[in-house]
Image (spheres, rainbow, N blue to C red):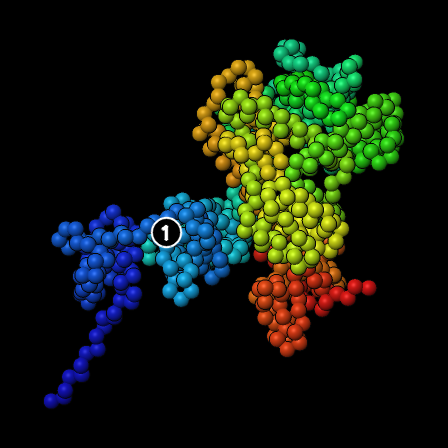
Amino acid sequence: MTKKKKRKSSHNKISNLTNTILSILKKDRNQTFNYKQIAAKLGVNDASSRNQIIKKLQQLKAKQEIEEVDRGKFKAIINTEYHIGIVDMASRGSGYIISDDFDEDIYIASNNMNKALHGDEVEFYAYKRRKRGKIEGEITNIIKRAKSEYVGVIQIHKSYAFVVPDGNKMYTDIFVPINKINKAEEGDKVLVSLEDWPEKADSPYGKVLKVLGKPGEHNTEIHAILAEYGLPMEFPHEVEEFANKIDTSITKEEIAKRRDMRQDLTFTIDPKDAKDFDDALSFKVLDNGLYEIGIHIADVSHYLQEGTILDDEAYERATSVYLVDRVVPMLPEILSNGACSLRPHEEKYTFSAVFKMNDKAEIKDQWFGRTVTYSDARFAYEEAQAIIETKANQIPAEVSLTGKPYLANQAVADAVLKLDELAKIMRRKRMSTGAISFDKVEVKFNLDEEANPIGVYFKTSKDANKLIEEFMLLANKKVGEFVGKQKKTFVYRVHDEPDDSKLAALQNVVGRFGYKLNFKDRKSVSASLNNLLKDVNGKKEQNLVDTLTIRTMSKAEYSTHNIGHYGLAFDYYSHFTSPIRRYPDVMAHRLLQHYLDGGKSVSEEAYEDKCNHSSNMENLATKAERDSIKYMQIRFMEDHKNEEFVGVISGVTDWGIYVEIISNKCEGMVSVRDMKDDHYEFNEDHYALIGKNSKTMYQLGDEVVVKVKNTDLVKKHLDFTLIGKHEAS
């Protein structure tokens, strides 16, 4: 008789069962679970698995990690304090949580993410890591998703598809059933929304909302940038229709309700390619020798009535978005470029701040209210700058953009010169009280008719820009002060003091270039930051130092809680001067008029919510604008692949160096893997990669020569090949 072979058990041991059971119980810590419910969660139903679960439950109960609240029903014993924070994803699925409860960011391993995504607000508990004593955590609950829509490229299979999201912050692709691909074709760039994330699924489930086009095509990538941040591409038809029906005529009845300033000399100074003009200046010399200067702002709130679909749309957008090749406006064109634009030789409804000022730029009187104005002339910044630089008291005919020479009106030139004089006095006063002078170079592109970049130029701020800036700052400051001193709810633009640790980090970097900061008190910090920005002006490290200094600053934001504006050194500051492109300015206009009419203070809570929304939308718009610049820089560099460029090392990491080209500010990366002449190691103390054998050092701020290795329009990534150090001639 043959001996029966011993049957091999088909039952496998459930791996990591302790942590899995604890995770299930802690996630729903107010619920009780029996072994059957846990087995169902694990997707097992065989006898061996059930026995393993029952045994493990008894062991955890004995260790007092869980409790049996009813026969066979278990609940986690919570002896951990839970915290709230925001997820900041790193690569490969791990990440960090930024929480007000901790001075340092909390590391979250990929297996403790529990389906949280970048930017999500989450609940977590923290514990000390045994090896390095650092704080680690586990996410226990997702409180609020940061976003539900993602941009990516679709890969279509027979009965399903996957969308691979753009960017490196999303660690999983998105599963899309074949009936939800919305006519997308293989390789299309699409916008997909998350619908569900089943417990046992590795990927969330979604559906395609919109096909954006083929990756790498110009319009596809620009639309993808907007979609990535949830920003609109066009106005809904019903909103356009509503706007087009608004009565935009200037009527005698409405003029009678306003201060009539149509006879005062008034003009606009804007970029030469501007299409909407939301601010104008008027100038008059009074009999007593004082100057009456009006800062006139488009009265958007006259047309934008609360409770309408137009106002709802403007509030949701909260800001215009300025991409490299287009503007996505907050308001439809009939208002932004038409009724609300202070175009030359047209009467307009305006909201004004009018000041009487002496030769020392001291304010002797102020008035706020609704006006009607007439713009006599339109200047580009270059035209106003020409007057200031030549001290001309008449304007050459060829300078005019309106087609009408200004020779007959020397008063306009005289006004520009006097306003420039007063603006310079105001600026000096502002700087002496601790304001910080940020004149960061802006990268601009010359585009052909197909939006191809054919050149790069830098936009700098000259006297004409600063003239307008000072008077806009004055209006914003005085409006904020006028309401703030009444202790009534208002929309402020606030800016907190810089964090000490960020200042110390800045000193570490700028110290490499021989600069020193003084942290003794608030005024000395401001003074030394100004000196730093002045000292680096025109030097190779200017853009790097400017960028790092701006990053050191707290973010300016909107709030009803006034803490002042650190960067401007103002105790009160609001946004009043750009209601065509910023919703907070519209709110400021409405509130100011309400208080001028004797109204009571409005709900602080309601307006704080509106401020938070406006700050969030501004932040998204800024990210989209940066992405569009990066995209255009990469397109520009595609046509310069065989050229050598001199650049400055703008960042050093253990995986490579970042280099910013001096001539066009395009930044790319040299991978340490491609530096074949030696084995380079990252030295954190020196912000450098140092060759193991040659001791060659590539340090932050060094000038190097690079060539383009690879351009990736989809990932907005630029790779360089390092030629070597740049030897200054």
Left or right, 7 with reference to 679 = left
Residue with the most extreme left position:
1
Q: Nearer the viewer, residue 134 or 281?
A: 134
Query: In percent of the image, x 67 and y 72: which residue is there?
Result: 696
Secondary element at image label 1? strand
Could you say which quadrant of the image residue 675 lies in? bottom right
Q: Nearer the viewer, residue 171 or 158?
A: 171
Q: Quadrant of the N terminus?
A: bottom left
Query: In percent of the image, x 19 and y 67: which residue is there?
Result: 48
Query: In percent of the image, x 60 and y 42: which residue is there?
Result: 522
Please, is residue 592 above or below residue 721 in the view? above
Mark 1 residue type: Phe
Left or right, 300 with reference to 177 = right
Residue with the most extreme bottom position:
1
The location of residue 173, given as percent across then percent down, is: 45, 57
Task: Count residues near mark 1 (Cα–Cα under 10 Å), then give few for <14, some for 14-19, many for 20+.
Answer: many
Please, is residue 6 above or below residue 334 in the view? below
The location of residue 591, given as percent across then percent down, is: 54, 23
The location of residue 120, given as percent across then percent down, is: 43, 48
Q: Count the marks.
A: 1
Could you say which quadrant of the image residue 60 lies in? bottom left
Q: Quadrant of the C terminus?
A: bottom right
Q: Nearer the viewer, residue 394 or 118?
A: 394
The answer to whether residue 595 is seen in the rendering is yes
Left or right, 48 with reference to 678 = left
Name the residue that disc number 1 marks. 124
Query: In percent of the image, x 57 and y 34: which residue is there?
Result: 564
